[in-house]
Amino acid sequence: MTVLQKIMYVEDEPDIQAVARLALEAVGGFTVRICSSGPEALAVAAGFSPDLILLDVMMPGMDGPSTLQSLRALPDLSAIPVIFLTAKVQPAEIAQLKSLGALDVIAKPFDPMKLSDQVREIWARSHG
Amino acid sequence: MADTSPSLQASLAAIREAYAASLPDKLAELATLYQALSAGGDLQSLQQLRAAAHKLAGSAGTFGYDELGNIARRLEHALRDWVAVGHWPDQKELAVLGSLLEAMHQQSRRKQAASTIPCRQPVAASAGENILIGIVEDDTDLAHELAVVLTSFGYRTQTHASVDSACSTFGDEPPDAWVLDLALPEGPMAGAGLAMILKSSPVPPPVAFISARSDFKARLAAARTGGSGYFVKPLDQASLVDWVDRVTHRHEQPPDNILVVDDDVELASYHAELLRAAGMQVVQESNPHHVMEALSKKMPDLILMDVYMPECSGIEVAAVIRQQEAYLGLPIVYLSSESDIDQQQAAMQVGADDFLVKPIVPEQLVAAVRQRAARARQLNLLMSTDSLTGLLKHVKIKEQLVVEMTRARRSQTSLAYVLFDLDHFKHINDTYGHLSGDKVIKTLAHLLKKRLRRSDSIGRYGGEEFAAVLPECSLAAARDVVEDIRLRFSELRFGQPGAEFSVTLSAGIATFPDIGDAEEIFRAADKALYVAKEAGRNCVCLAPALVQEGKHE
């Protein structure tokens, strides 16, 4: 089982970026790279070579699902595990997001003290 | 793994503070978009507002503004639906959006996280006097009137004239239910906004609206906030009190009593446990020969019985039960491991009410039993109670007096019997109509239920006469409580604004063991009531025998 160490978080909101960095780095002990948009994520992903990507669903311009699609088209990232984050919590929407090939969906707002545990749990479930 | 070091907490606090500092700007952005929308904006402004609400819905909770986030989510959902179908919000819908924004604004000024609306404690069955009702009404006369009515029914009240004032007390004891005017100083739908705030608390309290409007749109707006009551002005006080009683569970239901008959002790225990886990009281009987005995010990609300038992079948047991008139209305539900239609029909013919096939899903068993038991109990209630007031019928209250007197004699305690009669009731019916008269009757029934104890029995004699049996109650205590009821009732106002009226009552009291015979007590209470009427009404009199003998004066 691959050890989860490097996480890329794609999120357009600065507030959430700051708290997510804290939640994943300080609380979770991960190595984190934050990207502010889908295009930035595409540019950075190959060089950073993350173990996992957290993707906000609703972003201006390129949204989460289309970012995922483009990431999958990149040579080294075709199998990269992805978790969506969204404030939409309707079961149908979650099912739809999962059907795009995401490991799971984390509901926003997240609790900064628990985000890392949530991520680890999903990781363990899909890599166990 | 979670690191809770001070430095981490400090960083988190700093980020939260930064978020708090940026909140006014975020809300201002929402307000600007909302204004553009109200001024006749385009579909884009609808989408922009939705996107902004979505952001808040996803972020506010992370920074400790859970309620604000929840309201933002509702705002987003409304907008999402409208964007999806290309619906343009009308004035009223805009007003609802406005009240949501206002609610968010108020949330943003509140302290974060844990210091928001505290959890309501579940209302204790015996809490009675401790139930607190929040009233938000800017018409001070009406607010006062509501407070008086609810107090007279044993509730405590807390009144506010505005959303702001109501919000400012959130840190204190949370009311168990709220009565909100839809229109408040903050806006024509500000009450709905406040309801949204209340709805987002961990255990949302019940909310009712009072409003001058009775149109569907206003009612819908109220319903969307989770409001379970809606009362149009001028208020029907009795219905409002009914609602408060209902939502604060003052009409506490005793648990369902179920008799499980099955020769398979293990299976019977399993079914019994399932039902007990659902809050029912269960008696198990594994020998069908002992069913009649079990019935006479304690009358259940329902029998759950296996069809196949050695010696005699469940169908035969049912036939025996149905031979007795007292058990004609008792629901019988069969359990069978066979889905044989013929067997089922045979069972139904002797008066089974339902047929469940083993192995049964636990939820189905509980649901089937609960629903049948509730129906049966409802029917029994209908047969023994007065339809207008829900009080015991004449015959039943007399029975109750005999039962309680026997008990009092055995335990050597005292007992009081009270007769109440509304003064000049015919005049009220003639002047204000029978509907008003019924309302007065219902209101007195309510008041009696509220002011008397759970162990007391209350009945309506028919017409405007009521009776109550108060076990373990001395003459002095009875006189105090009846006097209190008389006073409170006389303070209530009925009718429409401009045509208001009040009603008084007279009462007569007789007590055991001063009078030792049930028939004598009836007569004595009746005489006392007559004396009260003769003395000019609106007063409470003791049975003449008690007064003359000076036993308790």
Image: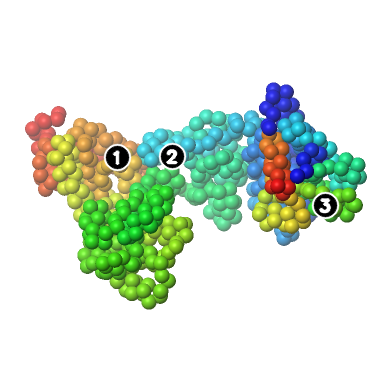
Question: What chain letter is assigned to the residue under label 3?
Answer: A
Residue B320 quadrant? bottom left
Whichever of labels 1 and 2 marks the residue nearer the N terminus, that label is: 2
Point out residue A98 in the picture as x, y percentages from the top left corner: 73, 54
**Residue B123 numbered mark, or none:** 2
Residue that appears at 25% across and 49% down? B459
Point out residue B435 in the picture as x, y percentages from the top left corner: 36, 55
For marks 3 and 1, give the CA distance.
70 Å
Type of amino acid at the residue the image marks with label 1:
Arg
User: Is there a contact, CB below 8 Å, between mark 3 and mark 1?
Assistant: no
Q: Which residue lies furthest to the left in this view?
A: B549
Identify which residue, B113 or B185, lies in the foreground: B113
Q: How is the image coloured?
A: rainbow
Residue beneath disc 3: A79
Residue that appears at 26% across and 46% down? B458
Question: What chain letter is assigned to the residue under label 1?
Answer: B
Type of amino acid at the residue the image marks with label 3:
Ala
**Residue A114 numbered mark, or none:** none
